Image (cartoon, rainbow, N blue to C red):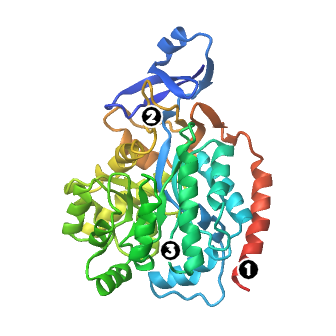
Amino acid sequence: MLLIGNGRLITRDEGKFYENGAVAIDGRFIKAVGETKTLRETYPDAEFLDADGGVIMPGLINMHNHIYSAFARGLSIRGYDPKDFNDILEGMWWKIDRRLTRENNRLSSLAVFADCIKNGVTTVFDHHASYFEIPGSLDDIAEGATKLGVRASLCYEVSDRDGEQKRVQSILENERFILRTQKDTSDMLKGMMGLHASFTVSDKTLSECNERRHGAGFHVHCAEGPADVKACLAEHGKRIIHRFYDNGVLGDRTLAIHCVHINRAEMQLLRDTDTAVVHNPESNMGNAVGCGPVIHMMREGLLVGLGTDGYTNDMLESYKVGNIIHKHHLCDPTVAWGEIPAMLFENNRAIAARYFDHPIGILKEGAYADVIVTDYDPLTPMDGGNVNGHILFGMNGRSVTTTVCNGKVLMKDRRLTGIDEKALMAECRQSAAALWQSVNA
């Protein structure tokens, strides 16, 4: 048994907070939470991990990431001069994903999951694309998650953009991985049916994906940029969310990513189908596609979570940006104080519960033992009613000192367990250099 204690304990369980709390872990699950003194007396033989007065809280969940984008960091593409989001896709991301090898996938997976652990992220919903080598590519991402001990939901980005053979391969890769994970009893890996976006998938493709998803949900970009909406209206005579509804894409197992350019009727359709939306504020700003109307979505009763879209692996960074951008966009200083932390700490947990068998993102008996410790020492009083303010203004991902997932210590005192990080980074640089040369060939 493992006991993590001697820290301010944020449980996310109905606001319960302990000034000097502890979490008792038995195998993969949380056995108890409470005062450190009480739990040390109750479990005297437990291994004790000392939080040293820091903050103990649930592991964070990233509802949308792109691990394959990791090797783009620092890349300069010859002739790249984007004027809009479509130029960014065609001039950078589609050039990169057409050249990604399985070695690139394997190494970027290890690097990103290592960075997630360092930032206290224990569960990742990833959306993958590597059109140079499709079959088996999700296994390469899964290998990184398994080796480092992170919980992950994976899918492959189905698209018509690279021809019939690649289209079919991408559908089959999703189907294969979905079936693999449905047989996996660890509850550490899940599979979904990935789709790129409305403007790169035909009705035929949507139909075939529906036939081959075996009950799994869709993970799809929706109305991220205005060109996607324009194409859908021109080609299908309807807006994106209505098109996806007509083709059986929506539902309580589906993640609708971005939804920047949707109207109220589309919001209500997402709500009525119980489809979850995932907001990615930094990516939307970086791609200059607009600020998603997520404040309005939440007022309409939608379940909206928070992701990073590959922009960062620091969910607390995205919390900070989300808090600011909606105030700025709406010229209203009263918004986002409650909505953004609700997305990160409550809604991400609720969405993840649709895929995993036991609770995550909460510290209570029976939940999976996903726990992080930060070195934050508050300079003002901290209690169950103001913890979000302390996190927002006092912490970032690198405040994390210890990360535990599924009862296993993945990082202790900022040192990763089970991997030589320096050797990994050296190998990543070598692999990325070869990729860059290929992109600019």
Q: Nearer the viewer, mark 1 or mark 3?
A: 3
Between discs 1 and 3, the one toward the N terminus: 3
Between discs 2 and 3, the one toward the N terminus: 3
The residue singled out by tag 3 in the image is 159
- How many residues crowd around disc 2 within 10 Å: few (fewer than 14), some, or many (20 or more)? few
Residues under labels 2 and 1: Cα distance? Answer: 43 Å
Between discs 2 and 1, the one toward the N terminus: 2
User: Mark 1 is on which residue type?
Assistant: Ser
Residue at figure coordinates x 62%, y 64% from the top left: 70
Q: Nearer the viewer, mark 2 or mark 1?
A: 2
Instruction: Name above or below for residue 219 compared with residue 407.
Output: below
Left or right of 28 on screen, residue 341: left
Front position in the image: 296 or 368: 368
Question: What number is the disc on residue 304?
Answer: none
Q: Quadrant of residue 411?
A: top right
Q: Secondary structure at mark 1?
A: helix
Front position in the image: 184 or 13: 184
Q: Secondary structure at mark 3?
A: loop
Residues under labels 2 and 3: Cα distance? Answer: 33 Å
User: Mark 2 is on which residue type?
Assistant: His
The residue singled out by tag 1 in the image is 438
The residue singled out by tag 2 in the image is 358
Residue 126, x across and y down, in percent: 53, 57
Residue 266, x across and y down, in percent: 24, 67
Callouts 2 and 3 close, C-beta under 8 Å:
no
Front position in the image: 235 or 323: 235
The N terminus lies in which quarter of the figure?
Answer: top right
User: Mark 3 is on which residue type?
Assistant: Ser
